[in-house]
Image (tube, rainbow, N blue to C red):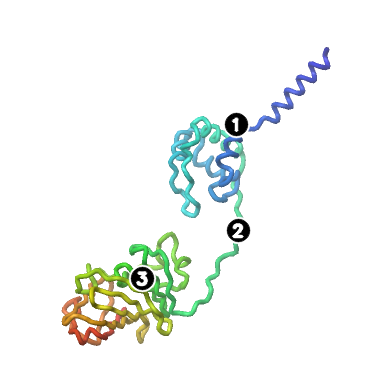
Amino acid sequence: MSRPILFLALTGQFALAQTPPTGEADYQVNCIACHQIDTKTGGPSLVAIAETYPKEKEAEFLAWAKAPGKKDLALIEMPSMAHVPDDALIRIHDYILTVTTDKKEQKSKPQFPQFREPHRKLPYVVHCFLPDTSPASLGVVLPGNLTLCWDTESCRVSYVWHNSKTNLANGMWLGKLSSKPFYRETGEAFFSLAEKPTYLGFRLIEGYPEFHYRIGETEVRDLIRNGSTADTWQRTFTLTNPPAKFSLNLAHEGSVTITSDKGKFTGDVLTLTGDEAKSFTLTFSKP
């Protein structure tokens, strides 16, 4: 009779040893795709989560899982786990604390080679998301470390900044420019014409963009290029069917001097006759 008893005892011990930690099954179903034990992948490691949410912060862990935000801006935002019952989330939390005991986070190796910006011939025009402007803006990268943000919605230059990179997505980080704009247009309307501009596209002339848009009955072509000296750029306007009297509001922030080969300035307002408005050039110079 002793042998069967011994056999049952050993069988019970064996079954106990194979019992997975509490919450492992819940973790496998809901978390493993983005969270590894000691390595940052799509999301933070379990080691990092355990450091942020120890046992006494179980309530905060549950609240975060149900309505997550974005703690690490370099990682994707976690979807809500509100569909997972509280008792399962508590088991997951217990599993995280158990499995990370005495573990340290491993440094993850980069999955891709470091980006090297390709050589691009300047000037260079690119669609990109830029801060403090409409989503329909373009970056105009000029030789001489100058980049202009041209807004296709309002048909005007939003601002200008120094930028040594032609890949604007790589030249910014999380919506920040590589340097603070030193020129920004501030007038409510660039042109005195009452109608809202309608963007018609752009063409390249020797690599420089000439933007084409319409304001009422007037068609405008706006060629942006480098000036004759460093930190200088020009905008040559060609207007078809301009009004008899025409003005531009050149109010701006930044220590930039603006001159025109035609018309007359009164403060920040440039007034031109209809004939002058058919073709004129503005020069923007930074002291």
What residue is rendered at 57% in x and 45% in y?
Answer: 35
- Give residue 162's mark: none
Residue 235, x across and y down, in percent: 31, 81
Q: Residues within 10 Å of mark 1 (few under 14, many from 20)?
A: some
The residue pinned by badge 2 equals 111
Label 1 vs label 2: CA separation? 32 Å
Q: Considering only order in the chain, which callout, 2 or 3, is on the residue closer to the N terminus?
A: 2
Q: CA distance from mark 3 to mark 1?
A: 55 Å
The answer to which image quadrant residue 266 occupies is: bottom left
Q: Which mark is residue 22?
A: 1
Q: What is the three-letter code of the residue carrying label 2?
A: Gln
Q: Amino acid at mark 3?
A: Cys
Dot 3 falls on a residue whose secondary structure is strand
The span from disc 3 to disc 2 (Cα, nearest Å) is: 33 Å
Nearest to the observer: residue 252 or residue 273:
273
- Provide the secondary structure element on which disc 1 rests: loop
The C terminus lies in quadrant: bottom left
Contact (Cβ within 8 Å) of mark 3 with mark 2: no
Q: Which residue is mark 3?
A: 149
Q: Position of residue 142 (x, y in %)?
A: 41, 78
Left or right of 241? Residue 87 is right
Q: Is disc 3 in contact with disc 1, using a CB cutoff of under 8 Å?
A: no
